[in-house]
Image (cartoon, rainbow, N blue to C red):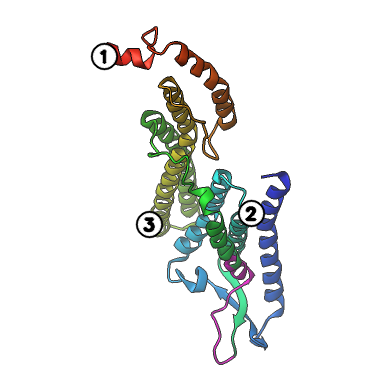
Amino acid sequence: MKRRDWALVIGLVIATWAIDQITKTWAVRNLTDLRFYGPVGLVLHFNPGAILGTFSHLPPILRVVSLSTAGAFLIFIYAAIQYLLPSRSMQLRCGMSLLLGGILGNVTDRIVIGEVVDFLLLGSREMATPAFNMADAIQWVGYILVVYGLIKDGSLFWPDVNARKTVWVNPSFQLKYCLTIVAIGFCFAVVNGVFAYTFLKVTIDDLVVGPARMMEDRFLIPFMQTYSVITIGFMFTLFVLGRILSHRTAGPIYAFENYIRDLLDGKERKLRLRSGDEFRDNLEDLADRLQPIIKEHVENNPEGDDESHPKRRKKSS
């Protein structure tokens, strides 16, 4: 990925969000009744739920907060995937950017006004699709690009060669790495949770005249339920990311150790690490430089002259 590639990928997120917000502002200011221009219809509609009105039956505190937070959480997922992708794959990356930009456009509506502005229809006055907006339309383009990118570059993401038999090549190191990341994330979640809970509780007690217990139960219990679900999802995501990142460090070291053992046993081969592995260039260059040295050493000491030689170790055992 070059700088202009990153500029395009990130720029699509901003452009999608901007197009969505501009068209929604126009719709709110100019649309008052149903209009059709051929197969395209225009009508102002406020959707309190998600796509096609799903989750609109939930209480506002659960619906608005949950859907808005989920959109913000997707920014974290998006950044992690963009970083971890081992291939340039611009179709996949751009598709993800269109998806995120569209989602953020709808999240902005929920944060600002509590509902999503929809104004587009397809069909006729007698039969038309549910109302949607530009963010929804652009997201479908994103879905198509993501699927196309996965099909086109699938062999790069799941290569048949250089595949390791297990993702836990160094379990003790990798598990420690994962738990450390999860622990840091959990501490951060606890700090945010305590701040948000106490801020909400103090605000309720300050605004309510008389006993505030009923209002606290109405708002604080749904808040804790929603926050707990989000925190569990966040911890799980951190653990998965930790496994992937730790494998990118432990994996090449594990492969390099096996490569050296093979050379000492007289098996000549090239060291080829996987795309995305840490220290890839350094280890492959070092392996190429060590191969003739170890080969010469093995040829000059066929039976081994010390306990470190594999053949001598077999005899000793």
Mark number for residue 90? 2
At x 52% / y 35%, what residue is drawn? 273
User: Looking at the picture, how far across and down is residue 298, in whole percent?
Assistant: 45, 15
Q: Is residue 124 magenta-colored?
A: no
The residue pinned by badge 3 equals 217
Residue at 57% x, 78% y is: 131
Mark 2 and mark 3 lie on one chain; the one further toward the N terminus is 2
- Locate the N terminus and report the quarter of the image it occupies: top right
Give the amino acid type for the residue marked by disc 2 in the picture: Met
Along the polypeptide, which appears first: circle 1 or circle 3?
3
Label 3: few (<14), some or many (≥20) within 10 Å? few
Residue 43 in view (yes/no): yes
Q: The residue under label 3 is which amino acid type?
A: Asp
Distance between the Cα atoms at labels 2 and 3? 48 Å
As helix, strand or loop, the secondary structure at mark 3 comes to: helix
Between disc 1 and disc 3, the foreground one is 1
Q: Given the current orientation, which residue lies at the most extreme left position?
A: 317
The vertical placement of 183 against 207, above or below, is above
Residue under numbered circle 1: 317
What is the CA distance from the residue labelled 1 to the residue labelled 3? Answer: 70 Å
Query: Circles 2 and 3: CB distance less than 8 Å?
Result: no
Q: Where on the picture, by quarter, is residue 173?
A: top left
Q: Report helix, strand or loop for mark 2.
A: helix
- Find the magenta span and give its range: 125-140
Residue sitting at the far bottom = 126
Identify residue type, mark 1: Ser
Q: Earlier in the sequence, mark 2 or mark 1?
A: 2
Tell us which disc is closer to us: 2 or 1.
1
